[in-house]
Amino acid sequence: MNSTNETDLLVQPAVSSQSQRIVVTMVIFLISLTGLIGNLSVFMFATTLKTLQNSFGRLSASQSFAEVILCAVFMCFYCPMVLLDIPSFKLASAHAGLILLFCYDVCIFSHLFIAVNRLCAISFPIEYSNIFNERNTRVLIGLAYAIPCFTSIYMHLANNCLLPYVDFGWYFGVNTSADCDVIRFYIDFCKDFGVVALIAIVDVMTIIMIKVTAPGMRLMSANCVQSQKKREREITFVKQCIIQGAVFATELVFFFIISGMQTQPVMIFLCTTVSWSLVHTIDPLILILLNREFRNMLMKNPIGRARTTRVTYSTQPIDQVSSTHT
């Protein structure tokens, strides 16, 4: 598709009715607003709590920051564009789509590094602080943003594979060309499924290590009052790993596979835009809902008191809860 046709397509009046666009806007606005609040909560507490001033907290904050941007783009750009049918927004949507793609890739690579962080915390509790020291954590955060700069921004721009808004289905679609088909399959589809598969493998290894180390942990903490609580954190950790991995895998299946089988705009919308925005709303909610201490802290403690509030996070090294590195 040449640039002239792309421009003409992007500034065409909406083919959907006003009532349809109102419903679409309300759905995405509510999803993205919830995601924005959830990710902002995770980001603020991960950057202010003393007990999260470690590698896991920094990686989580970095991921939440990208998800905040993604939810904000959906809420502040996508929703007005769809509702008001703004031509200038439609013209800019091709690049807004790349921003969304960039943020998504930052999230999945951050998830991968966090999964490795969790595995090391369980398998090598003594060496954990040396493996994930501040310098190495900064390198991982840099990679989580640098890799998507190449895959999501450079590769798409260099091959003119933008993501313009398509009114039939209310989604961001890749330009149609032979080069773009290659980019979409190898750079987007294969890469995303490959990273999610790696996350699943690491999570399975972590679950196995939790089971393997459980007897030793129970023996070491036999005389510890918090032994039962530590065991509960192990169970919470397993649930969190499984659910987060399942959510991202499900979203990829809907976005890349099931959406291609749909011909009705509503179904295309549900499989693409809704699944894309929803996965980044569910992600922080999983973290909040499955961690009782963090949830109670969010409900009871103002942000200003966060630095003096101690909370035990379920994904810290289990035998080092009482001596968290800050």
Image (cartoon, helix red, strand yellow):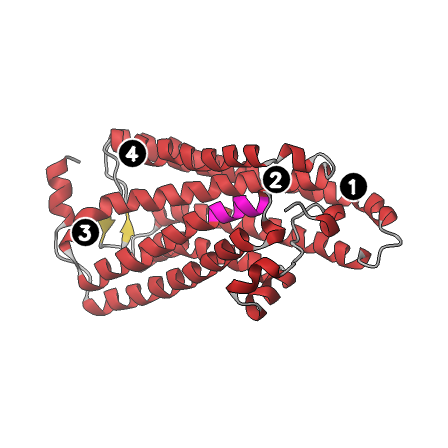
The answer for how far apart the CA atoms under marks 2 and 1 are is 18 Å
- Cβ atoms under marks 4 and 3 closer than 8 Å: no
Q: Which x, y percent locates residue 260?
A: 35, 46
Q: Which residues are drawn in magenta?
A: 56-63
Return the mark for residue 212: 1
Q: Indicate the quadrant containing the N terminus: top left, top right, bottom left or bottom right.
A: top left
Q: Is residue 284 left or right of residue 228?
A: left
Q: CA distance from mark 2 to mark 3?
A: 40 Å
Q: Mark 2 or mark 1: which comes first in sequence?
A: 2
Nearer to us in this view, 271 or 30: 30
Residue at 56% x, 61% y: name it.
306
Label 2 or label 1, whichever lies nearer to me, is: 2
Position above or below: 217 against 182:
below
Tell me, yes or no, whether the two marked residues, 2 and 3, touch with CB atoms within 8 Å: no
Identify the residue shown where x is 52% and y is 51%: 47
Regarding mark 3 in the picture, which secondary structure is present there? helix
Query: In the rendered structure, which amino acid carries the disc numbered 2?
Result: Asn
Label at residue 90: 3
Element marked by disc 4: helix
303 or 122, which is in the foreground?
Answer: 303
Name which residue lies at 35% across and 43% down: 101
Find residue 113 and report its horizontal and vertical position in percent: 55, 38
The image quarter containing residue 181 is top left
Observer-nearest residue: 203 or 14?
203
**Crowdedness near tag 4: few (<14), some (14–19) or many (≥20) residues, C-alpha within 10 Å:** many
Mark drawn on residue 117: 2
Alpha-carbon span between mark 4 and mark 2: 30 Å
